[in-house]
Image (cartoon, rainbow, N blue to C red):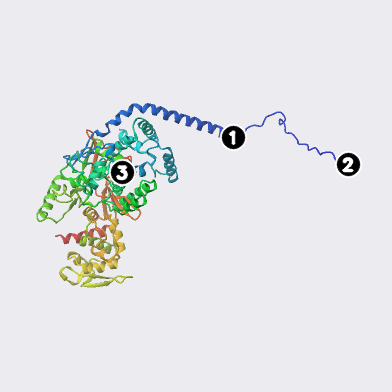
Amino acid sequence: MSAIEPPIAEVIPLRRGDDDEAPRPRPRLKKLRLLALLVGLGLLAAVSTCFGMMMAVASDLPELEKLAVPSKNSVLEDRSGSRLGILTGNQNRILLTENQIDPDLEHAIIAVEDRRFYTNEGVDLRGTGRALYQDLVARTAVQGGSTITQQFVKNATAAQNDRTLVTKIREAALAYHVTRKWSKRRILRNYLNSIYFGNGAYGLEAAARTYFARNHPGCDGVRSARRCASDLEPAEAALLAGVVASPSGYDPLAHPVAARRRRDLVLDRMRQQRYLDPVAYQQALRAPLPEKDDVQPPNEDTRYPYFTSWVKQQVVDELGGGQLGARRAFEGGLRIKTTIDSKVQNAAQSAVDKWLGGPPGPQAALVALDNKTGEVRAMIGGGKDEYRVRPFNLATQGQRQPGSAFKPFVLAQALSDGISSGSTWNSRKQTIKVPRSSERFVVSNYENAYAGPTTLARATTTSDNSVYAQVGIQVGPRRIARLSRRMGIRTPVSSNYAMTLGGLREGVTPLDLAHAYLAFPNDGRLVYGSMSAGEERYRGGVRNVPGPAAIELITRRGSEKAVKLPTGERARNARKARRVLPAGVAAETGSILASVVK
């Protein structure tokens, strides 16, 4: 039997002081504790600040009762300072009661703007958190987190130029108070009565009449008539609800593709939230958008309704766009000096009316720009008395086939490629096979008149289709299309053979064509103004591009100082230019074109 071995004792040497001193906290742990303390104090301060603001803003609540009465109208002036008209959102506003709002419209606006409207306390913390997360991921403001109540408060309060964090907290606090004092139906009614829906329609009833009065006869009569807003179809309600976020970007006349996409998104939200059953959803998707003859904007209180209806949206966009820009424009007490010349405008109107004085049917539009500055001097969108009956602006919205007016783009690209204006081409009837297709491009001249061998310059003077088809095909339709876009044509330009003779898929507006021509007398530079952004459609959506200048200066009434824009710049038009053609090419093209009109 073996003996049990004694346990082995391990001797651990002690460092000096280890036997009588407690372990010291690590420096990193101390920093974390300090950081946690500071964060806690910061949160406590933030909560205290928010609570204090909630108490302080209670006195502002009665001011919201005055929302239906705008503060100060804005005025439009011509370039000499003479008054053209008044911008006001109240002249056509018809206030609705809660019972006059169609349930489909109520559901549509809630579905797309604030799905928890009836359950939140004026501030949706989940929505705000989601928006903040998306903004942080994108490193820019990409998603809004405001509830309907917050939007209503933002529109109603005076400090609309101040978008600081303190202001937003104050608005959230006021939204909380409004929710405690007012019913949800009352908030929704006031919100819908106050917002802008585009095309001059301020408030829901004005919008319903503008876009859909023809669908609901009898609702657009006297003020005591049945309200159009009480009788909307789901597709109509979804369109109006979708327009709210961007009245210009989702305008069904100017941007039908974007408007339909937005409307269908609203319908899908309504389906997801069970406001629409599958059958009603599919029916609504098939509903057409309102067309130009259906839309009836309120009458413009101005001498030049076509111009002012167009420039009005320019002002809204410059002042921030959306609901905030509309409120600043219509109720900000502004003095808006435009570039229009009343003498030129009156002469232009007389010239157009002279041609439209015959039987009904002919249409005409005119745009006159200053070659050196790019400023709009005159704009005629139709006959003098047509606007009241058919308020469609042919100058800015009428996309027509340019025909031979598109040939200067072919000429400019040919000269850029080194083709001489003195080069000889054979003018004859032609049938050209289209590559990778069974189609044939048949080209003939007016009255079948052909010149035989002729120069490119001469073919321009006589507008020879045969020669220009040959030149365009040699240069390449795609390159001509790119040049036209660079020079200011904003509608999609097809790249087939027909486009060489001005046969486009969607046509162009007189405004775009006149602006593009400015590059010829300006050494190949496209002239525009700093307050002249227009919208261009492309495959992914809509983007802003430089356009003709129509706004000279925006000031407060009674002040000479230009107001500050959301970009931080002053609302004073600065002339700009960007090169789109070599100077020599522009000069030669302009010289050849001048010989056409001599």
Three-letter code, disc 2: Ala
How far apart marks 1 and 3 lie (CA) works out to 57 Å
Q: Secondary structure at mark 2?
A: loop
Position of residue 398 measured from the top left corner of the image (x, y, whole percent)? 22, 54
What amino acid does circle 1 point to? Leu
Query: What secondary structure is found at the residue carrying circle 1?
Result: helix
Quarter of the image where one finds residue 358: bottom left
Quarter occupied by the N terminus: top right
Tell which of 419 and 329 is nearer to you.
329
Residue 159 vs 299, above or below: the answer is: above
How far is mark 1 from mark 2, CA to CA?
A: 52 Å
Do we see residue 431 in this rendering? yes
Say if mark 1 contacts mark 2, CB within 8 Å. no
Question: Disc 1 marks which residue?
Answer: 29
Disc 1 crowd, CA 10 A, few/some/many (<14, 14-19, 20+): few
Residue 367 is labelled as: none
Provide residue 47's location: percent of width, then percent of height: 45, 30
Q: Which residue is mark 3?
A: 105
Q: CA distance from mark 2 to mark 3?
A: 97 Å
Camera sees residue 581 = no
220 over 457 or under it: above or below: above
**Given this view, does label 1 or label 3 mark the residue nearer the observer?**
3
The residue indicated by pointer 2 is 3
